[in-house]
Image (cartoon, helix red, strand yellow):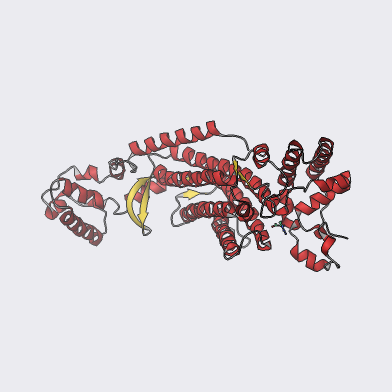
């Protein structure tokens, strides 16, 4: 079979060589974007008088037929035609005859593929932003149920100070808020048009790049044709935002996994997001959380892979760049899948508030309270720290917690202690009093939930369906 670019060649490559160079196996994912881009291009060719109206109409008709066939799965692609662009061009010529060969006037596959990728990522980024929002909503809903549920807060995975469980969950809300912002910001750079940059240098035809950009809903055009065809920063940005998002999800996965252990028993995963063991009948494994933690690795991999592909590439297009696609497609699927599963896990998990409550009563995480107490009464904090450290030791030696020591024992440590310390040491008081901005005090947590509701509402209002 002869190639669309076969004129200069005296022999054809062997099939296995074609197969190695072909991208049709994966870039057929861009079929819709490629047709959309072509429709805009040919409309522009018509408007600029580069092609006569009847030919433009024929080509558009043909492209729409291909679009319909693509939707019903009737299009047959071949490796000989290398990629989605050449396959569609060939199919168009088959459909409407030689006039189909005029579609590529004033265009190159280099600006064409870049256009497709911009269209694809614009759409997927918006869908991912929606999924981020759904997970944020799930977190807020779960948090609202647990403003007054206490959980040990950790540093170094050692009990540090008790916190509201809602506060803990909301930490992830804010991470996701930054993730959302990163995707949103990246859209500025995704939403510009490379179309019309040609192979690398522009074209001799009197095209109107602004017009085709407008037809495609782009906010502007690349200023430099070389940059337009060789820029893949927008994909790197997408992968980098996705890697960060996955890192956040992975951290929460780790906590969910820990919390569902026999040792913690803070939560129980809903049966629909857990699996059993084929040999140990008692087991319920938090598989989905583990899997998302694991999938984080492949998104990092795609980011590094593309950074490596691009480093050292001279301008402008190089075939290396065909390697930009699979990692991006994979990251899109991984991120969307992970976000959707996550929202489900958070919505359906059972929170064992009693176990959490018991935990905060059985530790020394209220020790800072005593030090603050003495400091408030004028003892320099460093000395207060020392006094309380000794009291903790007394309690450990007696095998009790701070609330179990007597006032006399407190007085022995410092005359500044009064009866009210027994209230001050209550975990609920401990949490309630951390009312500094952004702290875990119940008032602060309620305020944060209000802010979160507002942010979600604003996103809802500004949502433009992609
Ligand atoms: N399949 C190619 C890619 O994905 C399309 C652009 C090819 N351009 C070229 N001059 N070979 O990068």
Q: Nearer the viewer, residue 433 or 37?
A: 37
- At x 54%, y 33%, the residue is 462
Q: Measured along the vertical axis of the image, is residue 375 above or below residue 82?
A: above
Vertical placement of residue 165 versus 327, above or below: above
Q: Looking at the picture, how far across and down is residue 227, in whole percent? A: 60, 54
Determine if residue 284 is in view. no
Q: How many marks?
A: 0
Judged left or right of residue 347, residue 417 is left
Q: Say which quarter of the image contains residue 32.
A: top right
Location of the N terminus by quadrant is bottom right
Instruction: Note whether residue 386 is visible.
Output: yes
112 or 352, which lies in front?
A: 112
Which part of the image, by quadrant, shows the C terminus? top right
Horizontal and vertical percent for residue 396? Answer: 25, 60
Residue at horizontal 41%, vertical 48%? 355
Q: Where ligand 1 lies, by image quadrant?
A: bottom right
- Image check: 351 left or right of 388? right
- Considering every residue shown, the one lying at the far left of the view is 415
Image position, residue 391 (x, y; %): 20, 57
Please provide percent x and percent y for residue 352. Answer: 45, 46
């Amino acid at each position: 079979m002869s190639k669309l670019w076969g004129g200069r060649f005296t022999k054809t490559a062997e099939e296995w060589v074609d197969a190695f160079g072909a991208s049709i196996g994966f870039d057929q994912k861009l079929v819709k974007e490629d047709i959309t881009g072509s429709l805009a291009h040919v409309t522009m060719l018509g408007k600029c008088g580069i092609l006569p109206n009847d030919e433009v109409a024929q080509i558009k008709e043909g492209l729409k037929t291909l679009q319909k066939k693509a939707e019903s799965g009737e299009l047959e692609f071949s490796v000989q035609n290398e990629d989605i662009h050449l396959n569609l061009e060939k199919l168009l010529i088959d459909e409407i005859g030689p006039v189909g060969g005029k579609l590529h006037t004033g265009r190159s596959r280099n600006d064409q593929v870049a256009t497709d990728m911009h269209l694809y990522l614009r759409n997927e980024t918006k869908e991912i932003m929606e999924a981020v929002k759904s997970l944020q909503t799930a977190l807020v809903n779960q948090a609202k149920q647990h403003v007054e549920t206490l959980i040990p807060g950790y540093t170094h995975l050692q009990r540090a100070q008790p916190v509201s469980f809602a506060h803990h969950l909301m930490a992830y809300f804010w991470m996701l808020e930054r993730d959302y912002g990163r995707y949103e910001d990246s859209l500025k750079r995704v939403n510009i048009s490379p179309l019309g940059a040609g192979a690398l240098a522009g074209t001799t035809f009197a095209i109107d790049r602004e017009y085709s950009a407008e037809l495609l809903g782009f906010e502007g055009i690349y200023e430099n044709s070389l940059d337009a065809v060789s820029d893949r920063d927008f994909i790197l940005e997408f992968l980098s935002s996705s890697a960060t998002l996955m890192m956040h999800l992975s951290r929460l996965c780790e906590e969910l996994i820990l919390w569902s252990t026999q040792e913690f028993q803070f939560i129980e995963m809903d049966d629909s997001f857990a699996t059993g063991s084929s040999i140990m009948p008692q087991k319920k494994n938090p598989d989905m959380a583990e899997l998302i933690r694991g999938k984080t690795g492949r998104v990092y991999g795609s980011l590094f892979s593309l950074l490596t592909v691009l480093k050292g590439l001279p301008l402008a297009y190089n075939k290396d760049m065909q390697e930009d696609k699979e990692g991006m497609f994979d990251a899109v699927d991984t991120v969307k899948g992970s976000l959707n599963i996550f929202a489900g896990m958070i919505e359906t998990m059972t929170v064992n508030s009693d176990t959490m409550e018991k935990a905060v009563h059985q530790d020394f995480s209220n020790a800072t309270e005593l030090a603050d107490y003495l400091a408030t009464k004028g003892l320099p904090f460093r000395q207060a720290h020392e006094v309380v450290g000794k009291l903790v030791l007394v309690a450990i030696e007696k095998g009790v917690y701070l609330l179990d020591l007597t006032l006399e024992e407190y007085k022995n440590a410092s005359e500044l202690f009064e009866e009210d310390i027994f209230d001050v040491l209550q975990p609920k008081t401990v949490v309630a009093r951390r009312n500094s901005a952004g702290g875990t005090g119940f008032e602060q947590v309620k305020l944060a939930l209000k802010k979160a509701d507002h942010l979600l509402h604003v996103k809802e209002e500004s949502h433009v369906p992609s």
